[in-house]
Image: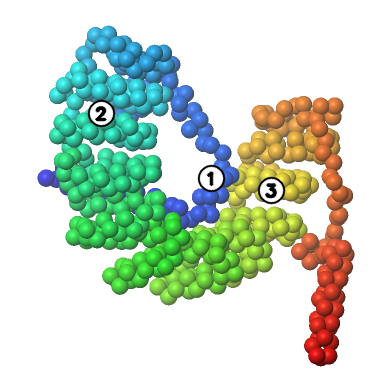
């Protein structure tokens, strides 16, 4: 009994974490910034290599192994080499497996799948598992089927999942709640929400009960892709099973409506929460704030600031205080519409209102200033951030330097790079790869060579070719018109040509209005 209770508690914890991970889209500024700026993590690049046949000396930990094996058994190595082989088709794979003479155990099958899942094609993994179930007969337990099904769900192979679920149902085996949650989530991500609901409605055929865990799992899966209306149908039909999970359910529904940018329905969910005694927390309000800002970004940009500030006032009335993440949601949308004045005002409001901006806030304001040509003001914002002791990571500088190079302001980019080096952040390689070709294509080969030598002295491996430093090879692009250097910030100063054009336009309007008035008086 205690083991069953512990299992249920672990499942419940998993579902709560799943719900929170759904909401990770809420701090969109941080997440989108990282997605656009961060490079692919090194562990992802090296994972496939680490799982190759040459590196099978250490296995990844599996729930089927009690200890982490130091070396690989010959039987496991033989199975993995057969499954991961790229020679021959599926029939050839089964023919090779039939030559396996050692004793086959369920633990060996699970370890082979774990070791091969990142290298072998899912069809080969499926054929291997089906061959194992045929040769082991009743030796494969329900947990082995569930483990294989989770692997195919992680690989997002719908056909393999469908075949294995059919066998699982035909043999009368048990699908556990964790497996169903992963299967439902994968089906919805593949655009097969009807199939996910079909599996949920027929859970009894998989010997899996419809309880608060499975109901919460299907609701989370549907809401993750914006199918909030269908999720509400599940809530209505199974409301007696989710009495203890109301906050979790409300968060999922709120997120589902926010994905659709449906402010009306998202507001209704918040009202229902309050009516049922569930006070929306910071996560809920940030979700609603993102929904509201993204809707206004498309349909009512002028309402971005006033409506967002009204939501923040409501938050404070419930003792839920906005954080930099809340303001960053608004700043991101303001930046997309190039609303420079409002962005600077929001940054000032944060400082004066006791919510200290983080480095993402300064990044968003500096970004919109650089993109709109306010380079002096943008540099002041960066200096202000550094003066307050905020230490952004090197991705902050990567993005802003890339923007400055994109708008042909390499000198400003070099100044920002010097500030980056003063902070000793490291990770200078990508910046050199951007600046050196940009300087050389602009004709500044001397500065490009200086940066190249500087990077070489620090043993930085550059991705750009040394040919860009050769004037006889590199193609120099000259600007179509000379750059005008103004000592006044471009947000204040305007060219005389623009002023004259504006005056002529106003004079024409005034002349047309006078002429129309005289004609009306004459009649």
In three-dimensional space, the C-alpha distance between marks 3 and 2, rounded to whole angstroms, equals 50 Å
Q: In the image, what residue occupies the spot 80% across and 90% down?
A: 523
Seen in the picture, residue 78 relative to 7 is either above or below; the reply is: above
Residue assigned mark 3: 403
Count of marks overlaid on the render: 3
Mark 2 element type: loop
Q: In the image, what residue occupies the spot 25% across and 28% down?
A: 64
Front-most of residues 434 and 519:
519
In the image, taking residue 396 as reference, residue 178 lies left or right, namely left
Q: Label 3: few (<14), some or many (≥20) within 10 Å? A: some
Question: Residue 367 placed where, x, y %?
Answer: 66, 54
Residue assigned mark 2: 64
Seen in the picture, residue 486 relative to 315 is either above or below; the reply is: above
Residue 431 visible: yes
Question: Residue 47 placed where, x, y %?
Answer: 45, 28
Residue assigned mark 1: 35
Front-most of residues 507 and 471:
507
Earlier-in-chain disc, 3 versus 1: 1
Between marks 3 and 2 in the image, the one whose residue lies nearer the viewer: 3
Earlier-in-chain disc, 2 versus 1: 1
Mark 3 element type: helix
Q: In the image, what residue occupies the spot 28% across and 70% down?
A: 276
Earlier-in-chain disc, 3 versus 2: 2
In three-dimensional space, the C-alpha distance between marks 2 and 1, rounded to whole angstroms, equals 35 Å
In three-dimensional space, the C-alpha distance between marks 3 and 1, rounded to whole angstroms, equals 16 Å
Question: Residue 257 placed where, x, y %?
Answer: 40, 59
Question: Residue 24 placed where, x, y %?
Answer: 43, 52
Q: Quadrant of residue 451?
A: top right
Mark 1 element type: helix
């Amino acid at each position: 009994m205690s083991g069953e209770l512990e299992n249920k508690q672990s499942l419940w914890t998993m579902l709560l974490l799943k719900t929170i991970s759904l909401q990770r889209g809420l701090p969109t500024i941080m997440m989108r910034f990282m997605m656009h700026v961060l490079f692919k993590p090194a562990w992802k690049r090296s994972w496939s290599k680490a799982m190759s046949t040459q590196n099978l000396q250490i296995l990844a930990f599996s729930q089927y192994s009690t200890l982490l094996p130091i070396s690989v058994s010959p039987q496991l190595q033989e199975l993995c080499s057969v499954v991961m082989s790229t020679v021959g088709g599926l029939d050839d794979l089964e023919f090779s497996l039939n030559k396996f003479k050692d004793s086959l155990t369920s633990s060996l099958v699970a370890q082979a799948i774990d070791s091969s899942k990142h290298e072998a094609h899912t069809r080969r993994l499926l054929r291997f598992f089906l061959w194992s179930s045929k040769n082991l007969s009743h030796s494969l337990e329900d947990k082995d089927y569930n483990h294989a099904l989770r692997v195919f769900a992680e690989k997002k192979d719908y056909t393999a999942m469908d075949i294995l679920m059919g066998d699982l149902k035909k043999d009368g085996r048990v699908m556990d709640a964790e497996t169903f949650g992963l299967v439902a989530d994968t089906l919805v991500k593949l655009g097969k929400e009807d199939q996910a609901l079909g599996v949920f409605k027929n859970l009894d055929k998989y010997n899996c009960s419809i309880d608060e865990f499975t109901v919460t799992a299907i609701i989370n899966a549907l809401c993750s892709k914006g199918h909030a209306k269908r999720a509400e149908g599940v809530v209505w039909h199974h409301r007696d099973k989710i009495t203890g999970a109301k906050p979790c359910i409300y968060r999922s529904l709120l997120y589902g409506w926010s994905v659709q940018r449906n402010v009306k329905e998202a507001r209704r969910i918040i009202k229902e929460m309050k009516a049922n005694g569930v006070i929306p927390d910071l996560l809920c309000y940030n979700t609603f704030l993102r929904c509201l800002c993204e809707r206004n970004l498309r349909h009512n940009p002028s309402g971005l600031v006033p409506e967002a500030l009204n939501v923040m006032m409501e938050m404070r009335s419930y003792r839920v205080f906005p954080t930099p993440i809340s303001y960053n949601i608004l700043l991101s949308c303001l930046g997309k519409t190039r609303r420079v004045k409002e962005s600077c005002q929001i940054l000032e409001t944060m400082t004066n209102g006791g919510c200290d901006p983080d480095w993402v806030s300064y990044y968003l304001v500096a970004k919109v200033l650089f993109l709109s040509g306010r380079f002096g003001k943008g540099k002041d914002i960066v200096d202000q951030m550094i003066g307050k002791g905020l230490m952004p990571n090197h991705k902050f500088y990567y993005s802003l330097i890339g923007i400055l190079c994109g708008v042909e302001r390499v000198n400003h980019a070099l100044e920002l790079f010097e500030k980056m080096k003063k902070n000793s952040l490291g990770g200078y390689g990508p910046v050199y790869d951007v600046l050196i070709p940009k300087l050389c294509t602009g004709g500044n080969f001397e500065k490009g060579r200086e940066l190249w030598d500087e990077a070489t002295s620090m043993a930085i491996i550059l991705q750009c070719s040394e040919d860009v430093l050769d004037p006889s090879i590199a193609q120099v692009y000259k600007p179509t018109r000379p750059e005008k250097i103004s000592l006044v910030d471009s947000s204040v100063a305007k060219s005389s040509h623009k002023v004259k054009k504006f005056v002529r336009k106003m004079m024409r309007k005034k002349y047309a209005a006078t002429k129309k008035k005289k004609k009306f008086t004459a009649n």
